[in-house]
Image (tube, rainbow, N blue to C red):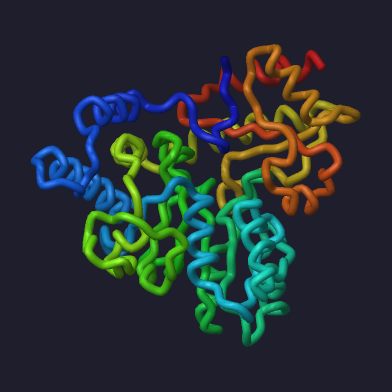
Amino acid sequence: MIYLDNAATTFPKPIEVVNAVANAIKKYGVNPGRSSCELSIKTAGLVYECRKAVADFFEAKGPESVVFTLNCTLAINMVLKGLLKPGDHVVISCFEHNAVVRPLKKLCNSHISFSKVEIYPKNKEKTLLEFSKVVNEKTKLLVCLHASNVWGIRLPIEEIVDFAHKKGIQVLVDAAQTAGVIKINLKKSKIDFLCVSGHKNLYGPCGVGLLISDNIEKLDTILEGGTGTNSIFLDQPNEIPEKFESGTLNVPGILGLKKGIEFVNNLSTENMFKHKFELILYLYNNLSQISYIELYTDKPNFEHHVPILSFNVKNKKSEEVAFFLNSENICVRAGLHCAPLAHAFFKTLDKGAVRISPSIFTTKDNIDFLLNAIKKL
């Protein structure tokens, strides 16, 4: 099988990650920090080492800035529901994933409102102008994905953060598609809340995500329960990260994530980006020569895109194309990709799009095989 749906989750995983997960189940199948036994203490130490590795990778203040979550979606919900109060206003981009839009839609029942702004690819000034038109004295938060999971278009995050902070507004960045692809420096960018998927470009297993913030104490909890600390008190403890990590942690996922981060560090985000981007450019250039292919974005470039490309075949639904490619043993993503706002931007709500997203394991021969299959249509 040629797997080209890495924007959903990377596959295969590096062998180091596979071994770390298996080893965790075999050797560290205990509850970290919930017992005075040596194995529980050692497991807690390994979890801390991953927390530290995450902080170092994203250049956060320290391990105390890192909270382990189930996935990026939960991290986003933790910020939205832990920060916003009745009367607050939120601004989002026109590319946002349902991980942002659906919780905000529900929060409207609690007298929280949100506005959507138009993004102008490759034009930072016009994009910032759109944000300036809708922020007001009630705006508490700006929410932006770092790059579209459908079109691969990057947003000018550092400029958006600078604009927001000058107005006293905090920023949540959904880095599901960029963590591990683009170097993210929290000290430099000053992002308030970074939400990360562990199973995509960090090459970790499914079931582990990250909320990284130097301001995490500002959030209220959306989940309470056992933390292994202050158990005599019925109130949730205020110590971080315990305040936000009720219940048993996903130890195999966390230890696998640490190996995934080491894998990315060893190859470097820059080299991984270059490899995948060259494949996307090669694909774009070849697809642009096929008369029945519909492309929507400009030719991708290093500054304004990540290695994701979506297209359609004229007179065919995206699902039809994906079904045919599956018969050729090629795995792609079709449909709306949980991002109807992004599809509305390019007017593809009626048929979705076929998305190609390579990984570090994808080869030029894989892309040639895909192109030959497309020509069979």
Q: Nearer the viewer, residue 272 or 222?
A: 222
Q: Quadrant of residue 21?
A: top left
Query: Seen in the image, is 5 located left or right of residue 14?
Result: right
Q: Is residue 198 visible?
A: yes
Q: Is residue 270 visible?
A: no
Residue at the image point whose x is 71% and y is 77% from the top: 134
Residue at the image point whose x is 45% and y is 24% from the top: 12
Query: Seen in the image, is 212 located left or right of residue 72?
Result: left
Asked if 220 appears above or below 319 in the picture, the reply is below
Q: How many marks?
A: 0
Asked if 253 appears above or below 216 in the picture, the reply is above
Residue 190, image x, y percentages: 42, 69
Residue 110, image x, y percentages: 64, 72
Q: Nearer the viewer, residue 155 or 321?
A: 321
Residue at the image point whose x is 70% and y is 43% from the top: 299
Residue 334, image x, y percentages: 72, 32
Check the picture and name the quadrant holding the C terminus.
top right
Q: Among all residues in the image, which is located at the extreme bottom?
A: 137
Residue at the image point whose x is 49% and y is 32% from the top: 10
Q: Nearer the viewer, residue 375 or 208?
A: 208
Q: Nearer the viewer, residue 155 or 141?
A: 141
Q: Quadrant of residue 225?
A: bottom left
Residue 36, image x, y percentages: 10, 47
Query: Seen in the image, is 211 located left or right of residue 156?
Result: left
Check the picture and name the quadrant holding the N terminus.
top right
